[in-house]
Amino acid sequence: MKQILAFACMLTAAVAALGQSPKPIPVVIELFTSEGCSSCPPADRLLAELDKEQPVAGVQLIVLSEHVDYWNSLGWMDPYSSHEYSERQQRYGTALNVSDVYTPQAVIDGRLEVVGNSAPKVEAAIEQARKDSKVPLTLQASRTDKGIHVELQAGGATKRGAEVYFAIAEDSVQSHVSAGENSGRMLEHTAVVRSITRGGKIGSDNSVSADLKAGQKWGKHLRVVAFVAEHEGGKILGATVVEI
């Protein structure tokens, strides 16, 4: 009787396990954009829709909006722009053999680049990126007096030399543009990157922790994205996100 009960318990557990939905595959979309670019607002809206609707079954879309600074001399100083993101885009351009970077440009998992305001091209790139295996990651993030403390745990081995990065992004961002190509428009943005910090390599215990600085003028609606990449501006091997 005990053997029969034990077998029944094992069978029930197996059936329950089969009934569980597989964990969504994370796919990172980095949109290089600018408030000074008239072609960028449609890309910003598309990014927001992808983030909100999560329309691809079995995929978790993790979005980041990185505002470049090379439009700032053409009439409007984008308040969210940084030369750091222009350099990051340039590194992707080199890695992906793109002769000239542009806005709006979407880079998917550091592997593919497409025009950021073309939904069909972005969706096709997502479908291609989902086929790649990813390193499972678990992230915990909490606010501290000095910023944000993060702890990342990898659920498997990572490629030798791969590095961890933490991005802090702000949601519910609005901006009234008073000059340049978008003059007179109220623009809304999702997951505006405020900082990207290199966290180093994952240790022997498959974990990384870090203390990230947070700006005093940042809003309350923040998310932290952690990702593992082959190198800076290289292929993304795994990613996760938490809201704080």
Image (spheres, grey):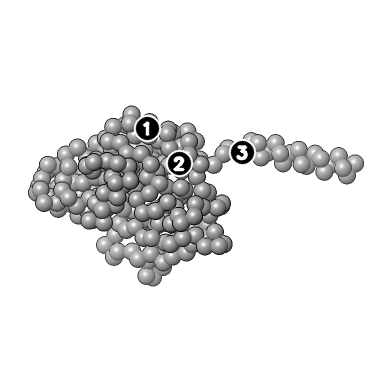
Few, some or many residues within 10 Å of mark 1 (<14, 14–19, 20+): some
The quarter of the picture where the C terminus appears is bottom left
Confirm whether residue 69 shows in the render: yes
Q: In this image, 131 relative to 115: left or right? A: right
Q: Residue at x 47, y 33 (%)?
A: 57
Q: In this image, 182 relative to 96: left or right? A: left
Q: For residue 4, which numbered disc appears in the image?
A: none
Few, some or many residues within 10 Å of mark 3 (<14, 14–19, 20+): few
Q: For residue 123, which numbered disc appears in the image?
A: 1
Label 2, on which residue? 60
Q: What is the spatial separation of the Cα atoms under label 3 and label 2, in whole angstroms?
A: 17 Å
Q: Earlier in the sequence, mark 1 or mark 3?
A: 3
Amino acid type of the residue that numbered disc 2 sits on in the rendered structure: Gln
Q: Which residue is drawn at 36% across and 54% down?
A: 232
Amino acid type of the residue that numbered disc 3 sits on in the rendered structure: Gln
Answer with the quarter of the image where residue 182 lies.
Answer: top left
